[in-house]
Image (cartoon, rainbow, N blue to C red):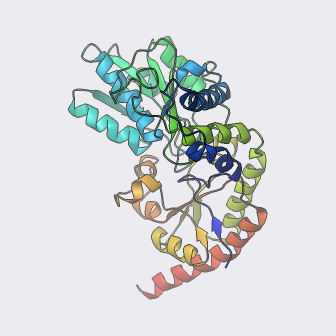
Amino acid sequence: MKKVYLDNAATTKTDENVLKEMLPYFYEFYGNPSSVHLKGQEAKLAIEKARKIIADSINAKPDEIYFTSGGTEGNNTALKGLFFRNFPKKDHIVTTKIEHDSIIETCKWLEKKGAKVTYLDVDSEGFVNPKELEKSITKKTFIVSIMHANNEIGTIENLREMGSICKGHDVLFHTDAAQSYTKIPIDVVKMYIDLATINSHKVYGSKGVGAIYIKEGIKIDPLLHGGGHERNIRSGTENVPGIVGFGKAVEISKKFNYKKMEKLRDILINGIFYEVPEVKLNGPKGEKRLPNNVNIAFKNVEGEALGAYLENKGIYVSTGSACMSNTGRESHVLKAIGLPPKDQDSSIRFTLSKDTTKKDIKYVLKVLPRIVEKLRKAKEIGK
């Protein structure tokens, strides 16, 4: 049976070249990068090489990149680190109702510690209103955190405009760029970004490693205390193989054809609309949407049932964020864009990769309409 993996927003397959780059750092260059001897310095040099590759990719300086265990740690570091550095003089955070759980849940936790949080509304396509952002900023605001691109519906926010507003009010601007990184150009200088979170396993690297960009001069309290690794921002022995792989993944990402991915995305969207009646695209169309993201509400179909039937045909998709699936909660993103509960329950996310082919999309478009028709008939009979 053909296998088609379309859950790349959850995680990507580690690229073969990335794996090859990582392997020697498990058994040959295995030293601790904090050690001053040759074995340690071999590992240290590899980390610094990866740091420069990642810094260059977003127009940052190498000393502004700090390695973490992933996106969740990066987001926690940004919000908690700045809160404890600024509280009680400043206690106000501005974010949105469609952020990743690692932002939303961190904000909720900080509210218990005395933080005041404004959760901005979004429109029906997931866009933040810049005027509402500007209105929400107060003299007590120390950070605005707005994701670059949404993990569920693919909405790409105008970071340059948001960053400019924050700069004008002398407020720090953070973005969770886990989904957009390498797919969409990011320039931390031109976009007025002060902090940015990225990770490896969304860009064909390994799990368990990420990075946070912190603009030079910004003071932040660390989450982890110990040996003072990562210039006292993130203590703990570095994941050398993971970091090396992360650097390699970013390096080879320059060769990817995201316009091709965008075309396949639109073939899938148009094919679904042509073959399946009563469907709705969640999120925007065209260039304002991630090149690999398709999120569709199939009316009168249970999303979980549709996902299970697709899996039986070798097609792997998601009914929402993988990070949220363990909780069984509704999608706060689909709720925030005003989607009715029935449409929320019927929504499926397809996310493509660099390896997705036209044949894969054709296979999905062959199988999907039959399954939807079957589920709708079964539901009608069951009434």
Farthest-out residue, bottom: 381
Mark yes or no: residue 166 visible: yes
- Quarter occupied by residue 274: bottom right
Where residue 180 appears, as percent x and y from the top left, is 60, 40
- Quarter occupied by residue 100: top left
Where residue 194 appears, as percent x and y from the top left, is 51, 20
- Quadrant in the picture for the C terminus: bottom left
Where residue 331 appears, as percent x and y from the top left, is 41, 54
Residue at 41% x, 37% y: name it.
73
Q: Is residue 62 above or below residue 311?
A: above
Residue toward you, 208 or 192: 208
Mark yes or no: residue 120 visible: no
Would you say 278 lies left or right of 73 here?
A: right
Count of numbered circles in the view = 0
Farthest-out residue, front: 37
Residue at 68% x, 75% y: name it.
2
Q: Is residue 185 above or below residue 267?
A: above
- Quadrant in the picture for the N terminus: bottom right
- Quarter occupied by residue 96: top left
Would you say 64 lies left or right of 276 here?
A: left
Residue at 67% x, 70% y: name it.
364
Would you say 123 lies left or right of 313 here?
A: left
Residue toward you, 223 or 269: 223
Where residue 21 appears, as percent x and y from the top left, is 67, 44
